[in-house]
């Protein structure tokens, strides 16, 4: 499970926090197909109170786009962050229908990742900073290294200087 948590954190850094199923508008895509039981119908069939429904929609899980039973690994390429209800929904579908949705999410991830890379292309980031951001300990927290400490110290000093300047 620690591996799944680590992958969820890395996916959130790349694609942003939140349910990829909803962010990709997979629910709307399913409705447009008209052949697969919709997410809305699935939610209506659940016997949850609205309060409990809200709780489950905030719980994010790692969905393996290629099932573990089929050799799918917990990885950035094979993972998607989705809420608990969407996860139950996907696994309630026949495998061939779930695969249609998984392909849709894969395509969204690819397009979204390319867009993020284009937006970041103009920003020059030193290799040490990238390496520091990618290093994660087994608890899923970013390791604080010397460069990050120096950056925080410089930021604090700048804030002090600005305050002194404003006080004059």
Image (cartoon, rainbow, N blue to C red):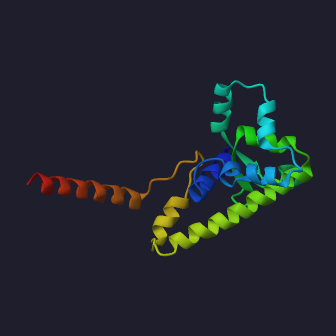
Q: Which quadrant is the N terminus positioned in?
A: top right
Q: Which quadrant is the C terminus positioned in?
A: bottom left
Residue 37 visible (yes or no): yes
Q: Nearer the viewer, residue 100 or 152?
A: 100
Q: Quadrant of residue 149?
A: bottom left
The reply, left or right, for residue 3 in relation to residue 34 is left
Write the residue at 80% across / 60% down: 103
Reply above or below: 89 against 30. above
Write the residue at 52% across / 75% down: 121
Residue 72 visible (yes or no): no
Write the residue at 74% across / 51% down: 28
Q: How far across and how far down the image is residue 143, in percent?
A: 49, 53
Q: How far across and how far down the image is residue 146, in percent?
A: 40, 59
Q: How far across and how far down the image is residue 11, in percent?
A: 63, 55
Q: How far across and how far down the image is residue 33, in percent?
A: 84, 54
Q: For the image shown, how many numbered marks are present on the structure?
A: 0
Reply above or below: 29 against 93. below
């Amino acid at each position: 499970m620690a591996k799944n948590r680590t992958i969820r954190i890395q996916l959130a850094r790349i694609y942003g926090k939140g349910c990829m199923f909803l962010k990709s508008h997979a629910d709307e895509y399913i409705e447009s197909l008209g052949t697969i039981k919709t997410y809305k119908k699935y939610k209506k069939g659940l016997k949850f109170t609205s309060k409990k429904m809200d709780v489950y929609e905030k719980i994010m899980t790692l969905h393996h786009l290629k099932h573990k039973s089929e050799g799918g690994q917990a990885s950035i390429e094979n993972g998607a962050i989705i809420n608990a209800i969407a996860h139950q929904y996907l696994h309630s579908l026949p495998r061939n229908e779930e695969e249609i949705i998984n392909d849709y999410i894969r395509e969204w991830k690819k397009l979204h990742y390319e867009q993020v890379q284009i937006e970041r292309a103009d920003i020059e980031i030193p290799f040490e900073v990238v390496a520091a951001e990618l290093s994660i300990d087994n608890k899923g927290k970013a390791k604080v290294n010397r460069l990050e400490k120096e950056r925080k110290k410089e930021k604090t000093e700048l804030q002090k200087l600005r305050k002194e300047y404003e006080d004059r």
